Image (tube, rainbow, N blue to C red):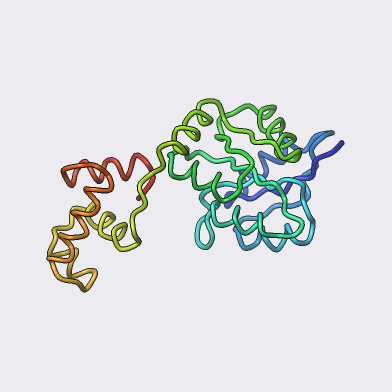
Amino acid sequence: MTTTVLLVDDHPVVRSGLRAVLDTVTVQIVGEAATGEEALTLAAHVHPDVVLCDLRLGAGMDGIQTTAALRALDPAPSVLILTTFDRDAEVLGAIEAGAAGYLLKDVAPEVIIEGIHRAAKGDMFLAPGIACRVLQGMRNPLPRLTERELEVLRLMSTGAANKDIARALFVTEATVKSHIAHIFTKLNVDSRSRAIHLAQETGLI
């Protein structure tokens, strides 16, 4: 039985390469999209069994947002993430959005084909090593920072001082200090450098 697939990647050369190795007897590529918005329009038209989607899609919707929107369609295609990014926040975000699997672009074509067929059947398919991290992440979920705390953390990562952060966000320095204290508590760290390092490692920023 042939599984129909929609490719979603903002790089034409990547889409061409995937089409060349995946369009086989058991996999039929029925469309290509460069953006999440384009993927939604195409998916609603061609009704693929599986959408093979990158995480980073340039301007507009990212892969996680696209996954959630695709899964809200009726009928909803299965979504298999194929990307170069494997930070915990992105992996867990994709799974939480409804992705049926998560693979890295350095896997062999036959692994991607297996993932496509497994996703079409409704099974979960994860790259080696990622499955353990997903389970660990679900047992020990990443701390949830507010949008304002994330803004403060992003500005901290640029080297901005408290007064610069306060000026950028139109708040007082005391408010910034309060946000930083909350960030330290949630991330269980005791310094700006550790907070920034942890946030970058886990994909929070």
Residue at the image position 51 percent from the left and 31 percent from the top: 130
Which quadrant: the N terminus? top right
For residue 15, side relative to residue 204 (left or right): right
User: Does 16 appear above or below 58?
Assistant: above
Q: Residue furthest toward the right?
A: 1
Total labels: the figure holds 0
For residue 82, side relative to residue 19 (left or right): left
Residue at the image position 58 percent from the left and 35 percent from the top: 103
User: Does 19 appear above or below 159?
Assistant: above
Say which of 142 and 91 sits in front.
142
Residue 53 percent coordinates (x, y): 61, 47
Residue at the image position 14 percent from the left and 60 percent from the top: 162
Tell me which corner region of the image, top left, top right, bottom left or bottom right, holds residue 123.
top right
Tell me which corner region of the image, top left, top right, bottom left or bottom right, holds residue 73.
bottom right
Residue 84 percent coordinates (x, y): 50, 38
Say which of 79 and 17 sits in front.
79
For residue 174, side relative to residue 99 (left or right): left
Say which of 73 and 10 sits in front.
73
Residue 146 percent coordinates (x, y): 34, 59
Residue 16 percent coordinates (x, y): 67, 43
Q: Residue furthest toward the bottom?
A: 170
User: Does 111 appear above or below 48?
Assistant: above
Say which of 16 and 204 sits in front.
204
Residue at the image position 50 percent from the left and 26 percent from the top: 129
